[in-house]
Image (cartoon, coloured by chain):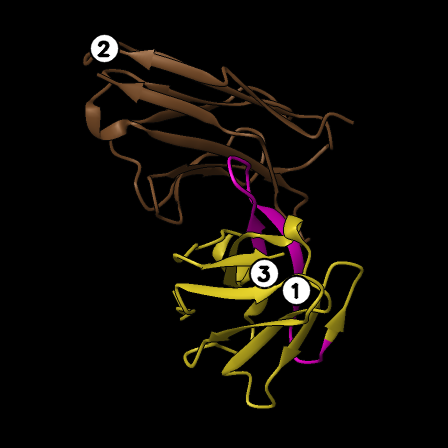
């Protein structure tokens, strides 16, 4: 299974943008880049995903490098409710849709 | 829609006891998954079911059995609980061919 590498932790100030990086140098052509987040004492929730092009939704934006070996999740204005562990995961339909979680990045947001 | 529901929320077992964790989804999803999460770690896949009537092992299946009772329900059984199975257990489901998994709130299990 292709692997991702994320910083263990990051800090942000409230109402400022946050850029969460992810490296996935062994990504294959059929791997989608997924981001999930896990708020304290809750199950993970889907944030965003993409294949090659940058993606935007109401929660975040996903910027994917041209060679697809790295990506960045962008929270445009961090709020206290965005404090969570963020997981960058490579997903492939050929793996039965399974998600392989790493340790993720713990984001703390300061008021 | 209730989404993915799990029962119980909390459970304390003694070593050697058995129990079944229940999971149900009302989204008409094909695939269902069981994960465990140990403190400070990411989730690890125990078993999954791509469709009703099929189950497959994940990364850490030892000590567990599963049953896909019907399309809605996927249960996880611990036949003889061990302290190493103390963890938080999450169930998830997804519509086959789509990429998004929906997770339940988790079951916190303590094995003494």
Element carrying mark 1: strand
Residue A39 falls inside the magenta stretch: yes
The chain letter under disc 2 is B
> x, y percentage for residue A4?
42, 69
3 and 2 marks on the same chain = no
Distance CA(mark 3)–CA(mark 2): 37 Å
Q: Which residue is mark 1?
A: A49
Q: According to the colouring, which chain is yellow?
A: A
Residue A110 sits in quarter: bottom right
Residue B69 sits in quarter: top right
Q: Residue furthest bottom?
A: A66
> x, y percentage for residue A18?
62, 70
Q: Which residue is mark 3?
A: A35
Distance CA(mark 3)–CA(mark 1): 6 Å
Residue at (58, 75) in percent of width and height: A72
Residue at (49, 15) in percent of width and height: B8
Q: Which residue is mark 2?
A: B14
Do residues under tags 3 and 1 come within 8 Å of each other at their CB atoms? yes
Q: Residues within 10 Å of mark 1 (few under 14, many from 20)?
A: many
Who is closer to the viewer here, A18 or A54? A18
Work out whether residue B99 can be spotted: no
């Amino acid at each position: 299974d292709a692997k991702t590498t994320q910083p263990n932790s990051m800090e942000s100030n409230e109402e400022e943008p946050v850029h969460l990086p992810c490296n996935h140098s062994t990504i294959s052509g059929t791997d989608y880049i997924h981001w999930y987040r896990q708020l304290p004492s809750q199950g993970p929730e889907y944030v965003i995903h993409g294949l090659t092009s940058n993606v935007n939704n109401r929660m975040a934006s996903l910027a994917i490098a041209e060679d697809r070996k790295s990506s960045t999740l962008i929270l445009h204005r961090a709020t206290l409710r965005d404090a969570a562990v963020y997981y960058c995961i490579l997903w492939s339909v050929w793996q039965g849709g399974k998600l392989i979680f790493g340790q993720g990045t713990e984001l703390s947001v300061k008021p | 829609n209730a989404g993915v529901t799990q029962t119980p929320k909390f459970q304390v077992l003694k070593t050697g006891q058995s129990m079944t964790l229940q999971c149900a989804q009302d989204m008409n999803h094909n695939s269902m998954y069981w994960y465990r999460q140990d403190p400070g770690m990411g989730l690890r896949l125990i078993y999954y079911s791509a469709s009703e009537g099929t189950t497959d092992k994940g990364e850490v299946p030892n000590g567990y059995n599963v049953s896909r009772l019907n399309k809605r329900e996927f249960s996880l059984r611990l036949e003889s609980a061990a302290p190493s199975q103390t963890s938080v257990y999450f169930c998830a489901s997804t519509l086959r061919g789509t990429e998004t998994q929906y997770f339940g709130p988790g079951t916190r299990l303590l094995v003494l």
